Amino acid sequence: MPVRFKRILLIILDSLGVGELPDAFEYGDQGAATLQHIAEAVNGLHLPNLQQMGMGNIVTIKGISKAENPNAFFGKMREKSKGKDTTTGHWEIMGINLKKPFPTYPKGFPPEIIKPFEKKIGKKVLGNCVASGTEIINILGEEHLKTGSPIVYTSADSVFQIAAHKSVCPLEKLYEICLFTRELLKPPHEVCRIIARPFIGKPGSFTRTDDRQDYSLPPPEGTYLDKLKNAGCQVVGIGKVENIFAGRGLTQSHHTRGNNSSMLKILELMDMGKEGLIFANLIDFDMLYGHRNDPKGYALALEQFDRWLVDLLKKITDDDLLIISADHGNDPTFPGTDHNREYVPLLVYNPQSKNCGDLGTRQTFADLGTTVADNFGILLSNKSNQEFMTPGLVGTSFLDCLS
């Protein structure tokens, strides 16, 4: 079967949800609508390129009109897996259905985790609570400098975060502690991500550095990324994609620091003309604006992305397929600072496409990965693995809809 598109560029706008899912009440997320509420908070968004692609045809967004003749196919996707975090969303895109969410710790980590952790490092921990990363270093940073005890905290996500001042705990040591913690956390405490959170500065002016490292659970073997790589396809990850998949299924990775460097790297790779899949995550929407309840900053970042699309679309050839989507919601106007259980947008562009229309509401994120695999002639087998995971969530390809 011939390959229809020689190269697919998949861009995930991290946390750009477009409205609550039917089961949002199970997560306390009734009423969440990331994109719509951002638009309302800034009295209308100006996203002419996304508007022309059909973003305003998916949901009603203040400032973004419906396109009468959109130049891209549009739709939205429903998450089937349990959970609402980055890893769950990305894994489902690539064919994994989580039957139950990763463990979370709203009351902090229990003694069976903390005691062996403290024994290994030879110190008591500070914190051990749900907290904002920027706030907890300001609250506990001075005590950390005096005692050398690491700051341990979590969030509504399945994360074990370790903050340490670089003068107290050099990066190599902090990374070593995280690696040990990754080995320590076994079922039922198999936390999705261990995160190193180094910081610098003095009391009253502590600042996190760009030396963050994530130590993620590896996905079960047999994702679409694995299948593509094993079939000889180039699979390039940009941003935190390598961390999300623990390096599996990728032939090349580019660790970028934020949206700007990721977008520059995408343009650079497009100029190289290679075939296969380019898979990018733009993290700033979630990390800098969603989690910090900053709708104005989120809006400015979206408008910057929309302007950048002008340069990207010039590089998209007839042999390319551009897909823009998201992995969950993070409504910056919603109570709290956590992710939200939302639909995500779906925009699919090729210069030759005619009569672009509605791809409808896809019943799983896996429809996206299935379409990518379908394009490259790859099938995913139904093989189950760990007890809370079911690889083999084969979605419905929409490749034949792309006229």
Image: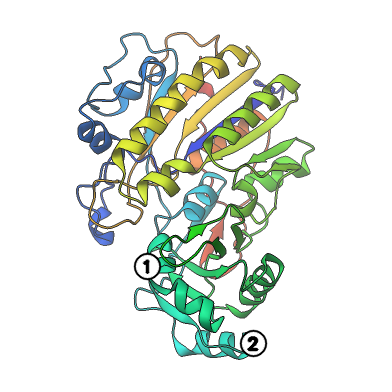
Q: Locate residue 249, reporting x and y percent.
A: 70, 48
Q: Quadrant of residue 3?
A: top right
Marks 1 and 2, how far apart in space?
24 Å
Q: Locate residue 168, reporting x and y percent.
A: 61, 73
Q: Which mark is residue 344?
A: none
Q: Is residue 205 above or below residue 44?
A: below
Nearest to the observer: residue 76 or residue 252? 252
Q: Secondary structure at mark 1?
A: loop
Q: Is residue 151 visible?
A: yes
Q: Secondary structure at mark 2?
A: helix
- Residue annotated with mark 2: 120
Mark 1 Cα-neighbour bin, 10 Å: few <14, some 14–19, many ≥20 = some
**Which residue is found at the position 27% from the left and 54% from the top?**
23
Tag 2: amino acid: Lys
Nearest to the observer: residue 39 or residue 201? 201
Mark 1 vs mark 2: which is more N-terminal? 2
**Which residue is found at the position 40% from the left and 65% from the top?**
155
Q: Is residue 402 visible?
A: no
Q: Is residue 391 above or below residue 303?
A: below
Q: Quadrant of residue 391?
A: bottom right
**Which residue is found at the position 23% from the left and 27% from the top?**
60
Mark 2 Cα-neighbour bin, 10 Å: few <14, some 14–19, many ≥20 = few
Q: Which mark is residue 131?
A: 1
Nearest to the observer: residue 375 or residue 259? 259
Q: Locate residue 396, reporting x and y percent.
A: 49, 37
Position of residue 69 in the picture relative to residue 336 (left or right): right
Position of residue 42 in the picture relative to residue 94 (left or right): left
